[in-house]
C-alpha cells in the first residue's frame, strides 16, 4: 500500500523510516568542474530518487563560466545520462532540477558573495530553504582559503536562529603538515570544527565501513585481533590504470600524497583502532587519532629502510603495451614523481607491539584491488607430518574493499582421500550475493550524512594533521635524496618493495 506523506512523516518521527535532512541549499564552488558533474550532482540526484531529500531543497552552482540556470541544468542532465544511459527518471529529474541554479562569478571577488547572499535569501523565501547552507569546495585547493575568507566576511559562516552553515572540503587537506595546519587555521577563523566536513570518499564506501562491522559486531575476531595472534598486516591499494589525463595534477601530488596520506591512513586506522564506546563522530574519530599518535615516528635516516618509492616504465597491462609514466601527457621526461609507494609501519601500543603494517599502493599494477590482509601466526605445532602439510599456509583473513567486495578466511583442510594431506582453502563471503541491496555510491552516503549533520565518516583536523606528521620524514627525505625505483607497467612494483618484506622473511600477497 502506498504511504501518504502524513503517514511517512509519522513513521519518520517514530524512527521507523530513515531521517530526512532539514530544508537547505548546497552551494557548489567549482560548479562547471569534473567533481560536480561526475560525483556531487549524481549523488544528490540519487538521494532525490530515493526521496531522501526534503522538498525544500536547492543546489546553487558557482564558477566563472557564463551559463544560464537552464544551460547548467542541461549540462548536468547530459553528464548524468552519459553515466547511466537510459536510467535517468524524467519524473525525478524534472522535480530535482527545478531546484538547481547557477551563478556565474569569480570565487575571489567579494561581489560574487554579495550576489550569492541575496540569491540565497530569495531561495529561502521562494523555496522554503530556511537559511540552512552547505558550502561545497569543489574547485582548486589553492582557492579554499580565499573562499572561506570571503564567506566569513560576507557573514555566511555564522549560524543564526538555529540555521546551519557547513563547509565541505575535498582532499588534498594541504600538501604537508605545515600547509595542512595553515589550512585548518584559515578555515577555523570563520568556521568552528563542527561546521567542517572533510571528505575522504573511502570512508563513504560500504566495504570500508564494514571493517568496523566485521570487527565490532562479531565476537570471534576481536579476541585474536592483536600481536598475540597476528603476524603482520598488509594493506594494498592497487590500480591497473596509469595517470591518464591527470598528468599535471599527478606531477604535483604523487602516490604518497594522493593515496597514502588519506585513504590508506584511514584504512590503517579502522583496522588498528580500539573499539569506540559508541558509533558517533567523537568516539570513532578519537580512536582513529589514537592510532595515528601510536604510529612509530620514522627517523629521517631510517626512511630508506622502511619506505620504497617507484615509478612505472613502459610495459604490458592486460595484453596491451602501455606508456611509461615519463612518456605520459603533461609529465616531465625526467620526473621523479612516485607512482608506487611501499611502507613498513608499526603501531606502538599494547595491541600491536611488534606487528608490522606493510602498506603499498601503485598505478599500472597487474590488477585493480584494494584489500586488507591480516596474516595470523603459524600454528605452534602440528601433529601431521611435514609431507602432509606442505600445502598448508598460516590463517589469513582478507577484507576485500574493491572489487569483488567481501571477506575470505584461509584455513587448513584435509584433502579428500586416504592419508592426511592438508591444504589451505578459502572460506568466502561475497557481499554482492549475501545482500540483494544495491551498494550506494560513497558520495551519496557522505552527502546525506553531511546534510543530516553527522560527521562520523568525515576527517577531523587532528586526523589530517596526524597522517601528515607520520609521512613528513618520508617526504623530506625523498625531496632531498634517493632516486625513484622503476618497475615495468603490469608488474607488482619495484624489486626494492619485495626486498622490504624479504628482509623480514615475508613476501607480498598477490591479490
Ligand atoms: N575530480 C575528482 O574525481 C576529484 C576527486 C577527489 C577530489 N577532488 C578535488 O575536488 C576539487 C575539484 O576537482 P575537479 O576535478 O572538479 O576540478 P576541475 O574540473 O578543474 O574544476 C575546477 C572548478 O573550479 C572552478 N574555478 C576555478 N577557478 C575559479 C575561480 N577563480 N572562481 C570561480 N570558480 C573557479 C572552475 O570553473 P571555471 O573555470 O568555470 O571558473 C571549475 O568549475 C579539487 O580540490 C580536487 O582536488 C576531485
Image: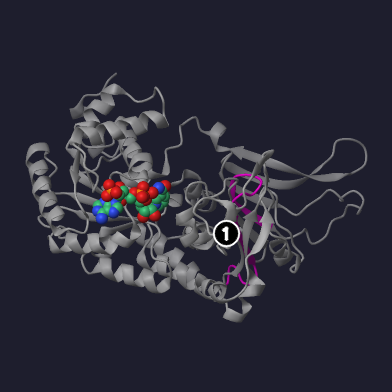
Identify the residue at image location x=62%, y=72%.
Answer: 353
Above or below — where is 175 with respect to 68?
Answer: below
In the drawing, does residue 262 fall left or right of residue 134? right
Q: Is residue 374 magenta?
A: yes
Instruction: Give the SS element for disc 1.
Output: loop
| Residue 4 in picture, x, y percent from top left | 21, 24
How far across and how far down the image is residue 235, in percent?
A: 60, 56
**Residue 281 locus on image (x, y percent):** 35, 58
Q: Quadrant of residue 200?
A: bottom left
Look at the picture and state if 466 lies above or below 114.
Answer: below
Side of 67 relative to 506 (left or right): left
Q: Which residue is mark 1?
A: 333
In magenta, the rendered stretch is: 350-375
Q: Position of residue 203 (x, y in %)?
A: 44, 51
Examine the rendering and report whether any part of residue 82 can be seen: yes
Depicted 74 relative to depicted 365: above or below = above
Amino acid at each position: 500500500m502506498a504511504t501518504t506523506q502524513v503517514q511517512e512523516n509519522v513513521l519518520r518521527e517514530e524512527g521507523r523510516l530513515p531521517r530526512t535532512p532539514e530544508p537547505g541549499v548546497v552551494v557548489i564552488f567549482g560548479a562547471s568542474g569534473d567533481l560536480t558533474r561526475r560525483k556531487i550532482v549524481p549523488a544528490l540526484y540519487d538521494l532525490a530518487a530515493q526521496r531522501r531529500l526534503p522538498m525544500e531543497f536547492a543546489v546553487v552552482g558557482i564558477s566563472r563560466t557564463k551559463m544560464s540556470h537552464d544551460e547548467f541544468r542541461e549540462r548536468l542532465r547530459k553528464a548524468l545520462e552519459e553515466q547511466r544511459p537510459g536510467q535517468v527518471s524524467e519524473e525525478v529529474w524534472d522535480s530535482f532540477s527545478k531546484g538547481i541554479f547557477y551563478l556565474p562569478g569569480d570565487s575571489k571577488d567579494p561581489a560574487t558573495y554579495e550576489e550569492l547572499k541575496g540569491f540565497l535569501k530569495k531561495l529561502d523565501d521562494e523555496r522554503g530553504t530556511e537559511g540552512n547552507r552547505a558550502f561545497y569546495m569543489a574547485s582548486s585547493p589553492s582557492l579554499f582559503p580565499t573562499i572561506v575568507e570571503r564567506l566569513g566576511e560576507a557573514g555566511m559562516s555564522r549560524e543564526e536562529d538555529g540555521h546551519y552553515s557547513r563547509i565541505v572540503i575535498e582532499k588534498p587537506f594541504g600538501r604537508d603538515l605545515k600547509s595542512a595546519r595553515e589550512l585548518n587555521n584559515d578555515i577555523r577563523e570563520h568556521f568552528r570544527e563542527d561546521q567542517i566536513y572533510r571528505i575522504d570518499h573511502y570512508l563513504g564506501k560500504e566495504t570500508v565501513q564494514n571493517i568496523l562491522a566485521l570487527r565490532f559486531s562479531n565476537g570471534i575476531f576481536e579476541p585474536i585481533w592483536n600481536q598475540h595472534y597476528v603476524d603482520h598486516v598488509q594493506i594494498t591499494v592497487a590500480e591497473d590504470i596509469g595517470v591518464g589525463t591527470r598528468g599535471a595534477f599527478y606531477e604535483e601530488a604523487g602516490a604518497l600524497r594522493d593515496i597514502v596520506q588519506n585513504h590508506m591512513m584511514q584504512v590503517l586506522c579502522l583496522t588498528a583502532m580500539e573499539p569506540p564506546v559508541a558509533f558517533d563522530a567523537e568516539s570513532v574519530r578519537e580512536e582513529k587519532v589514537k592510532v595515528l599518535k601510536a604510529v612509530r615516528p620514522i627517523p629521517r635516516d631510517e626512511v630508506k629502510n622502511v619506505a620504497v618509492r617507484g615509478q612505472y616504465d613502459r610495459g604490458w597491462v592486460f595484453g596491451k603495451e602501455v606508456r611509461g609514466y615519463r612518456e605520459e601527457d603533461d609529465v616531465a621526461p625526467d620526473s621523479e614523481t612516485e607512482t608506487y609507494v611501499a611502507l613498513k609501519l608499526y603501531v606502538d601500543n599494547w595491541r600491536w607491539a611488534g606487528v608490522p603494517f606493510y602498506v603499498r599502493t601503485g598505478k599500472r599494477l597487474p590488477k585493480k584491488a584494494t584489500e586488507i590482509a591480516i596474516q595470523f601466526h603459524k600454528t605452534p605445532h602440528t601433529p601431521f607430518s611435514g609431507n602432509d602439510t606442505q600445502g598448508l599456509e598460516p590463517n589469513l583473513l582478507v577484507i576485500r574493499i574493491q572489487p569483488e567486495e567481501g571477506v575470505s578466511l584461509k584455513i587448513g583442510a584435509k584433502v579428500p582421500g586416504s592419508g592426511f594431506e592438508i591444504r589451505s582453502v578459502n572460506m568466502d563471503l561475497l557481499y554482492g550475493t549475501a545482500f540483494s541491496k544495491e551498494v550506494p555510491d560513497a558520495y551519496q552516503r557522505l552527502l546525506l550524512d553531511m546534510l543530516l549533520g553527522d560527521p562520523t565518516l568525515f576527517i577531523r583536523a587532528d586526523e589530517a594533521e596526524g597522517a601528515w606528521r607520520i609521512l613528513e620524514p618520508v617526504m623530506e627525505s625523498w625531496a632531498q635524496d634517493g632516486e625513484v625505483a622503476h618497475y615495468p607497467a603490469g608488474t607488482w612494483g619495484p624489486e626494492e618493495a619485495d626486498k622490504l618484506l624479504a628482509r623480514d622473511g615475508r613476501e607480498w600477497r598477490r591479490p
